[in-house]
Image (cartoon, rainbow, N blue to C red):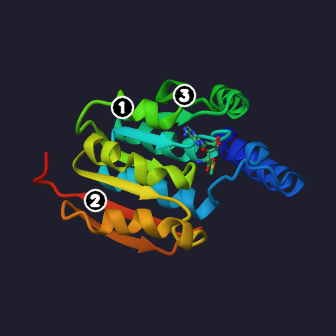
Amino acid sequence: MQSPLEALKTELEHFGEKNDNAYSERSKRMLNITRDTGEFLSVMVRATAARHILEIGTSNGYSTLWLAEAACTTGGSVTTVESSAYKAGLASDTFSRSGLSEYVTLVHDDAGATLTRVTDASIDLLFLDSERSEYRAWWDQIRRVLRPGGLLIVDNAISHREQMTPFLNLVESDKDFTSILVPVGKGEFLAVKSAGDA
Ligand SMILES: C[S@@+](CC[C@H](N)C(=O)[O-])C[C@H]1O[C@@H](n2cnc3c(N)ncnc32)[C@H](O)[C@@H]1O
């Protein structure tokens, strides 16, 4: 029998698929990560023993559940940022039903503004799954908030390769980061910050 958390994930998967088939406007679509991406994030959090996790782009909280479930095992927690009031409302409901509320802080705000308030070198793992056209403008803040050895994971690196290329080139050309493209889900781009860079 499925655990309540597994049942909630399955429910959200079905809801996301049905909802996203019914709407074409991005503002109404959930645009959730795939299940194998959730499994990948879970392994990454555990393998890196990430404790301070920042997610940009919450939607209704599906990906956050994977991060928070893993954060329970590392003694960590997830701060997740969502600018849409509608989706932040759905995510709030997801987290209260998940049994993981104490491991999640939901910030209803613009991610660019939120990033400026994050302490230097304080984030172990940052999962970026938001408005792709904004990533280049956020890069200076993202590289500032990641700790030495911190890991950036970006979704849609294969599914939206063309849109992502300017940002991926920017990260790849940064001498303080080592990156790789992983063919899981919609394509996960990983970049780790040099351990020697403060
Ligand atoms: C692809 S969806 C996130 C899906 C989620 N990670 C999941 O897998 O369940 C992208 C989300 O980013 C949000 N978003 C877009 N621009 C944003 C911004 N500037 N600040 C914060 N959130 C933003 C959108 O409202 C949308 O819910």
- For ligand 1, which image quadrant applies? top right
User: Residue 95: where, in percent of width, then height?
Assistant: 62, 30
- Going by the numbered disc 3, the residue's amino acid type is Asp
Residue at left offset 31%, top offset 40% = 123
Q: CA distance from mark 3 to mark 1?
A: 12 Å
Above or below, 176 against 5 in this view is: below
Mark 3: give few (<14), some (14-19) or many (20+) Cα within 10 Å. Answer: some
Q: Earlier in the sequence, mark 2 or mark 1?
A: 1
Q: Is residue 94 above or below residue 62?
A: above
Sequence order check: which comes first, mark 3 or mark 2? 3
Which of the two residues, 66 or 85, is positioned nearer the viewer here? 85
> Quadrant of the image for the C terminus?
top left
Label 2 sits on residue: 192
Secondary structure beneath label 1: helix
Question: Disc 3 or 1, which lies upstream in sequence?
Answer: 3
Q: Is residue 157 left or right of residue 3?
A: left
Q: Which residue is mark 1?
A: 116
Q: Amino acid at mark 1?
A: Thr
Q: Check mark 1 vs ligand 1: CB closer than 8 Å? yes or no.
A: no
What residue is drawn where x is 58% and y is 64%? 36
Is label 3 in a helix, a strand or a loop? loop
Q: Nearer the viewer, mark 2 or mark 1?
A: 1
Task: Looking at this view, name the residue that lies furthest to the right.
Answer: 22
> For numbered disc 2, what is the local secondary structure?
strand
Q: Which residue is more in the foreground, 137 or 78?
A: 137
